[in-house]
Amino acid sequence: MLERLTMAAFKTGVVVFLALGVVVVLVQAVGLVAGSPGLVSGAVSALGMAMTVSAGLTGLLGFAMSYLFHWNAGED
């Protein structure tokens, strides 16, 4: 049960930080095309902290899971 819950949290975290990263890159691309430096830097200002925190927490959760569930290197 614990493994299923932590794996669900891990997968959710991966989806969240990847989605935030895609949004940041797309908004920055639009800012580049539109010639709007405020849009380029504003994307990171608005979403950068959430993206970084979610990536960090997801990474720490994955690290903790490797110890909790005794995963070996190369295992799927």
Image (tube, rainbow, N blue to C red):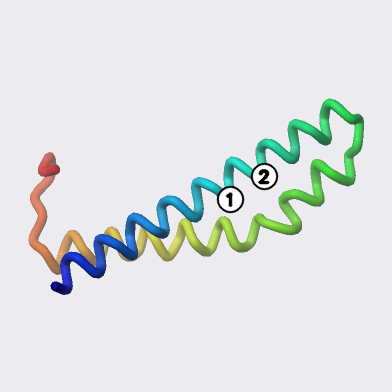
Closest to the observer, 65 or 15: 15
Quadrant (top left, top right, bottom left, bottom right) of the C terminus: top left
Q: Image check: 56 left or right of 75?
A: right
- Give percent across and percent down for residue 72: 8, 50
Is 24 left, or right, of 30 in this rendering?
left
Mark 2 secondary-structure assignment:
helix
Residue found 83% across the figure and 35% down from its top: 31
Residue at the disc numbered 1: 20
Check contact, mark 1 vs mark 2: CB within 8 A: yes
Residue count near mark 2 (Cα–Cα under 10 Å), binned few <14, some 14–19, many ≥20: many
- Secondary structure beneath disc 1? helix
Q: Which mark is residue 24?
A: 2
Q: Quadrant of residue 71?
A: bottom left
Mark 1 belongs to which amino acid?
Leu
Horizontal side of residue 62 vs 46, given as left or right: left
**Tag 1: Cα neighbours inside 10 Å, few (<14), some, or many (≥20)?**
some
Q: Does 59 sit left or right of 16 as displayed?
A: left
Residue sitting at x 81%, y 51%: 42
- For residue 30, what is the image quadrant? top right
